[in-house]
Amino acid sequence: MATQAGPLPFTGSIGNVTGYKKNGKHFIKEKSVITRDRVLHSAGFARTRENAKEWRRAVRAGMLVRHSFRRLLKGLQLADNELSGRLHGWMNKIVKSDLVSDRGERTVSKGQLELLEDFAFRSATTFSSVFFAGPVSSIDTVTGTLKLEIRPFDPTRRINAPEGATHFKIVAAGAAIDFEKERCQHNYQETGYLSLAAMVQEPICLEQTITPLPGQSLLLAIGVVFYTQHGDGRFDRVDGGVMRILQVFSVLK
């Protein structure tokens, strides 16, 4: 590294040297030559190759999760624009939690998949800040039964609804994902329209069954969707819905 002392300092590359500015001073350095072949085969880039392999697995796993819940995420718009990046980063944490495999060979299926529990599909609005009626979930890995239960509650006290909303729905989505074979099954249930101004008198129970296969992981997610009712009885969806993953279990191989 050398300091530029001439009357016309530069930034950028000229030939095999690069000029740059740091802390108000101009410097030059020899341009490093990193070829694709060097990255793929040099021992000095072994860690880079390991990280790249694991990151690709995390991205593929994140895509499977998004695909499994696409009806809620896209159809009901329960996700934000940053979901992909956040979910890929989250899945990468799960890959790195694999304590069995060697570095570079770690996978989602051997990691701590329960880290995915409580993942929020919107970063700015947490599920618990909108809905606090205490949902209870259960997953039976033998029968593939995924159940969501909510006791009677008062929406005026337990839901922080967006402006203009008059009604809401509780939605539940179940998924069985094989992260190794990159295959998934999914299901979806929802309540009818429920008034934000009236007590929910009966318990809510959304139950679905997805026949689990060895090596699959069962995921159960909950969402709250808001609507406004017009004078003619028509309902339109209102922005402000939220969704989170409640529970995750893996089926033994």
Image: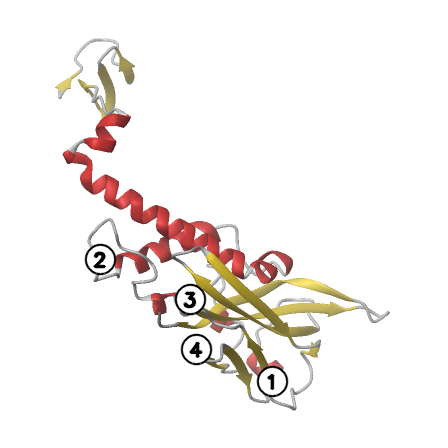
Q: Earlier in the sequence, mark 3 or mark 1?
A: 1
Q: Nearer the viewer, residue 126 or 213?
A: 213
Q: Earlier in the sequence, mark 3 or mark 2?
A: 2
Query: How far across and how far down the image is residue 86, in percent?
Result: 41, 54
Q: Tag 2: residue type? A: Ser
Q: Splitting the image into 4 quarters, where does residue 189 fall?
A: bottom right
Q: Nearer the viewer, residue 227 or 151?
A: 151
Tell me the mark number nearer the camera, choosing from 1 and 2. 2
Q: Gap between marks 3 and 2, in whole Å?
A: 19 Å
Query: How far across and how far down the image is residue 212, in percent?
Result: 47, 71
Q: Which mark is residue 101?
A: 2
Q: Gap between marks 4 and 3, in whole Å?
A: 10 Å
Q: Gap between marks 4 and 1, in whole Å?
A: 22 Å
Q: Tag 4: residue type? A: Thr
| Figure quadrant of the N terminus | top left
Query: On the image, numbered disc 4 is attached to which residue?
Result: 141
Query: On the image, numbered disc 3 is attached to which residue?
Result: 216
Tell me the mark number nearer the camera, choosing from 4 and 1. 4
Q: Gap between marks 2 and 4, in whole Å?
A: 25 Å
Query: On the image, numbered disc 1 is attached to which residue?
Result: 204
